[in-house]
Structure formats: structure tokens, C-alpha cells
Amino acid sequence: AKPPLHAVLSLYDMELIAERQMKPASFNYYTTGAHDDYTKHGNQMAYRMLKLVPRVMRNVSSVDLRTSLLGQPSSLPIYISGSAKGGLAHPDGELALSRAAWTEGVIQMVPHLATRSLQEIAQARHQDQAQFVQLYAEKNRDAFREKLAEVSSLGFKAVFLTVDAVGVGKRETDLRTTPEGTAPRSKGKKTQRKWADNLTWEDVSFFRAHSSLKLVLKGVQCAEDAMLAYEHGVDGIVVSNHGGRNLDSARTSLEALVEITAALKEIPGAKERMQVFVDGGIYRGTDVYKALALGACAVGLGKAPLLGLAAYGQAGVERTLQILSEELEAAMQLMGTPTLKDIRPSSV
């Protein structure tokens, strides 16, 4: 028997319970990295290696975790990132994620490869709820244009365009239980990938010509590309290596974030015009704190909400967010930083 929900103290606890609830093939798909998992584990280890520098004698009687992501209010500097196949965790899949996001006051990014239709997920939205959507650009740009029109008509507020998945990593943990691999292979006989492997910076103009939604590039991993994103006028970037699932030995998200923040600091007003998000390796509220200190405005959670969903349904997703919220609030108090604006590079 699984423990009562209140006895789940950490995201590590939740992951263990989810593993016991799920089919091995499904759990492996959610948790696999590429090759030797160096980047997947590195994402996590980078946070462990970074040390906090507390300030004392500060008034932290009231701590405020609220923020704004792309103009949309959020109770936390955390969002549910778009991760494929939510239905492997629970029959309600992305609908349960949407309801949990609303309950906890955070924003859900709906995945292109959801198990429920975008229409169903949009209909599950509360009337005052904001949702983002994650898309892959399609090789067939006419099909991509139609998809952009669809997400616009369904009321999503921003498109997170994945730019780090022009191929698929060799995800060995997944391949061991699913010989063909769960993700469509680019050269697979059964499932030919339809995603664009010919994306260029000119596609930002293509997007602008066919959509008025905010555009965030998901998967930026170096200062040069962050600067190009800024020059092309995108609304945000996600510093991400796809959870270490594609290119193993890529730098950790946190290393890339440090470089990108430093480069954008050189441009007056860059941080205000282009929001910087980060994902990969977040297990603790202190991890969220460290990401904010190093220049991110919010962090994305992909795997953690799905594992919460697998373990306890919608309530498990809510508990996952509550754990991180409680840990972040405690960290902010102990660090002497009552608001997110008080969190500075000198904090780490």
C-alpha cells in the first residue's frame, strides 16, 4: 500500500511511489536520459554543487512568491512544462495537470504530443486560467501554419517552440523496455518523424507572420543563440537541454544559464524584453532559488508533475507543487530575501 499523501515529503519520495504504480515501460519513458545519462544527472548535480550564501537580520515575516510569466500572473516562479504522453501516468492525463495548475495558481504549458486533444485541454481550462502551449515546428510549414492558427483559436497565451529536438537522442533506458523507442525515430521504418530538421532563424519571421501569440524558444543552450534570440525579438527563451534526453554530454542547464545571463546583462533592457526560463534537474525548492539567483525568472517542471500524477492523480500534482512552494518559501526566509526581487547573484 502506498503512504498517505501527506506523508510524501519530497519529490524523491513521489518518484519512488510513482515507479511502483507505473508500468516499467512508461516509467522508463518518463525518466530516461540519452546514452549514459551524463547530462540528465549533471542537470541535477549542478544544483547540488552550488552553495547558498544566507543574509541575516532581515525582516522575512512576510514572504511573497508571486510573479508574472509573459504577462500572466503566477503564484510561484514555477510552471508545468510541456512533457509528452501524460496519459501514461493517469487516464485524465493533461486534463488533471490543467486542473492542478489552476488549483495551485501556476501556469500549465500544454505539450504538442499530449494524450488528450488540445481542444479538450483548452476546454478544461478555468475561465480565468492562462495556458501556454509547447509546439514542434513541422517540416511541412503549411501544417505548422494550421497548427499555429489552431492554438491561437483555442486561447493559448504563448507558444514555446522546441528548438533542441531536430533529431532524437539514443534513450537507452527507454529502448530497453520499448525496442523501437517510445519517441518517433527520424529514420525509423514505422514512424517517420514529421518535425522540422530545417529550422532556421528565418522561421521566427514565419511565426510572426502567422501568429500574434508570444513566442518563446525552448532549448537554447549558449550565449550566442540567446543573443540571436534577442536580436530576432522573441519574447522569451528556455535554457534547456531537453532533460538530457537528446544530446548526452551537453552542458547542464545551470552552466548554460550562467553564461546566458552574463551575456544578456551587457545589453541594456534585455532582461525586461526577453524573459529567461530554465528547466532540467529541479528537485528542491533550493534548486528553484539557485536558478532565480543565476538569472532565471521561473523554472519549468516536466517529469515531476507527471510522476505526481502517476502516484496520486491530480492530488499528487498539487502535492508536488506544494512541496516545492513550501521549500522555496523556507529558503527565502532563511536566505533573508522576502521577495523574488531580493534574490540576487550574490545569494549563491
Image (spheres, rainbow, N blue to C red):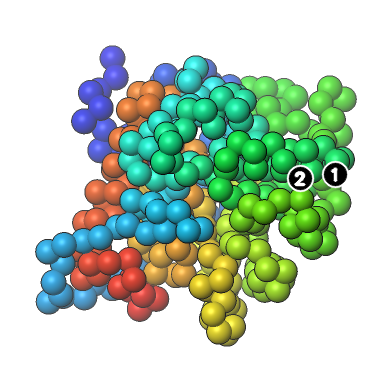
Q: Mark 2 points at which residue?
A: 137
Camera-nearest residue between 230 and 222? 230
Separation of marks 1 and 2 at Cα, in angstroms? 8 Å
Residue 53, image x and y in percent? 28, 73
Is residue 55 shown left or right of residue 182? left
The residue depicted at 59 percent of the width and 79 percent of the height is 263
334 over 145 or under it: above or below: below
Residue 76, image x and y in percent? 35, 52
Any part of residue 294 in sight = yes
The residue depicted at 53 percent of the width and 35 percent of the height is 31
Label total for image? 2
Is residue 320 shown left or right of residue 56? right
The residue depicted at 40 percent of the width and 53 percent of the height is 73
Q: In this view, which residue lies farthest toward the top?
A: 1
Is residue 119 shown left or right of residue 129? right
Residue 35 image-quadrant placement: top right
Camera-nearest residue between 37 and 1? 1
The residue depicted at 39 percent of the width and 45 percent of the height is 106
Look at the image and tell me in which quarter the N terminus lies. top left
Residue 130, image x and y in percent? 47, 44
